[in-house]
Image: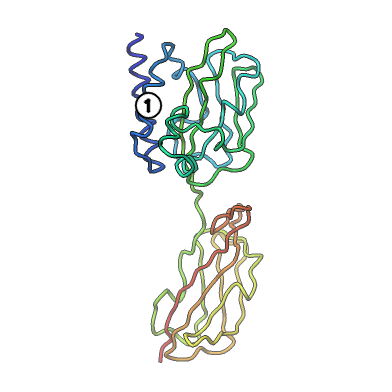
Amino acid sequence: MEVSVKRGIKIVLFFLVILIASACGMDPMDLDHLSSQRADTESGLYETVKLSIENGASHVRSDVSIEIKFPRSLQRGAGNEKNIFLLDIADVESSTSSDERDGLFAGICDLKLSVPAAVSTYDRINFAIRPYDELKEGAVYALCILDSIVYQDGDTFPGMVASFRTMLPRRVKIAMTSPSDGEAGVSVSRAIKIVFDGMVDLSILEDENFEIFSEEGDYVNGALSYRENSPIANIAFEPDEELLPGTRYFARISGAFEDVDGECLAGRSGDGDCNKFIYEWSFVTAN
């Protein structure tokens, strides 16, 4: 039974090494010693620790709070931010050399690179770690639980590493334009329209957010309107005068737009503000 437990631990950790290494561009051999370190334990405690996320999960919310359940009670103060923490794998790869990683637990668990987070418990068995800020979208993270943790009975926890990837939220995008990009023979009196594939908060829409201009750089004046409370967002631009025949025009929409759930169409910057969403296309009017 002891042999099968050890072998199971080796298999689990081998695939964990490959997942973390491939996710951040590391050579899997850089973390090969992770298997031998964890296989040294005689207790099989790695398998009995329960997490609220699956190891290797790929659709974890960026505002995640991870629950950790140890098999036995820890000593008072044993589980804290110094031995239970999260790492952005990309930060580890860019900030440490392979030689430096050799000196770290599991080759990656550098407390200095940890994501700011709070660790809490109510009974010294059940713990939770919650980042102070939302994690990056579509990034790979490692949960490090170090081997410096001691159980109430004096046994030392063997340590473990689990990894996961945060999900990329579905963002509303432009479904179609009229005229379409590159369309020729467009009527000089035709309205210009944009249709999104979902609901967008267009309350910030102003004339400066939508521009029509010719290849020569002459801007077109007109009336901008949008349909409110529609399952899909629609924007229409009616030129004040007919467009010039046989002329290439460019249309551009830009702005820090959000969908009705508050998700930025172009993602968020480091300070939390919406990035500017920009979409441009062109068409040619009929002669």
**Which element carries disc 1, helix, strand or loop?**
helix
Height in image: 199 above or below 132? below
**Residue ID at (45%, 41%):** 93
45 vs 222, left or right, is left
Residue 166 in view: no
* Spot occupied by residue 24 in the image (x, y as percentages of width and height): 41, 42
**Residue ID at (50%, 51%):** 170
To which quarter of the image does residue 115 belong?
A: top right
* Spot occupied by residue 193 in the image (x, y as percentages of width and height): 51, 74
* Spot occupied by residue 69 in the image (x, y as percentages of width and height): 55, 21
Three-letter amino acid code at the position of disc 1: His
Residue 87 in view: yes
Height in image: 114 above or below 186? above
Pointer 1 local density, CA inside 10 Å: few below 14, some 14–19, many at least 20: some
- Residue annotated with mark 1: 33
Compare residues 73 and 244 and report the one nearer the observer. Answer: 73
To which quarter of the image does residue 83 belong?
A: top right
Height in image: 35 above or below 284? above
